[in-house]
Image (spheres, rainbow, N blue to C red):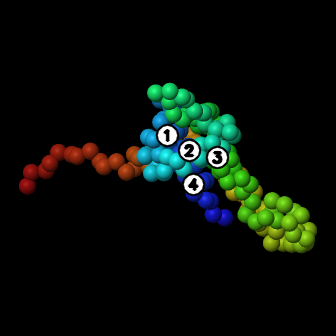
Amino acid sequence: MKLSTRGRYGVRAMLELALNNGKGPVPLRDLALRQEISAKYLEQLLIPLKGAGLVKSVRGARGGYQLALEPAKISLYDIVRSLEGPLAPVECVQDANYCERVGGCTVHLVWGEMGRLLVDYLSRMTLADMVARQHEKDRMCQPSSPGLAVAQ
């Protein structure tokens, strides 16, 4: 299964909002610049996220977008599902009427299990988890503080 840019960019934008949670709304332009996403495209992604109750917009000079819920209450599944639709790896898992072989097809069972594992993983991973991972990554990437120079 391959996520489209909608899902990938949507998760990036939501992580950015989570990193700024509690600091007020993030202007669309700033969000787009930080994530290197076209503002026009990003705006189209925020519409279904807003419709799903994951983000809210604030109008005015200090307006922008912010999370509608705490980061721990928003799963990656919530985000991806609102942008991508059902996450079934193949059509027959999503719609048993799609293929007449579904009842006796072992491959269908494997695809179904794979889909459930994916949904389970994305459902357990929250934006709070992603924020923690980002902070850990940032700590690992920071250069160590310069020590005292050793005289030679």
* Circle 4 SS class: helix
Which kind of residue does numbered mark 1 sit on?
Leu
Residue placed at 68% from the left, 39% from the top?
Answer: 51
Give the label, 2 or 3, closer to the camera. 2
Q: Which mark is residue 8?
A: 4
Contact between marks 1 and 2 (CB within 8 A): the answer is yes
- Pick whichever of labels 4 and 2 is earlier in the sequence: 4
Q: Name the amino acid type tagged 4.
A: Arg
Q: Which residue is mark 2?
A: 43
- Tell me the quarter of the picture where residue 55 sits: top right
Side of 11 where 48 appears, left or right: right
Q: Residue at x 64, y 46 (%)?
A: 79
User: Which is more toward the observer, 25 or 2?
Assistant: 25
Q: CA distance from mark 3 to mark 4?
A: 10 Å
Residue closer to the observer: 146 or 70? 70
Q: Earlier in the sequence, mark 1 or mark 3?
A: 1
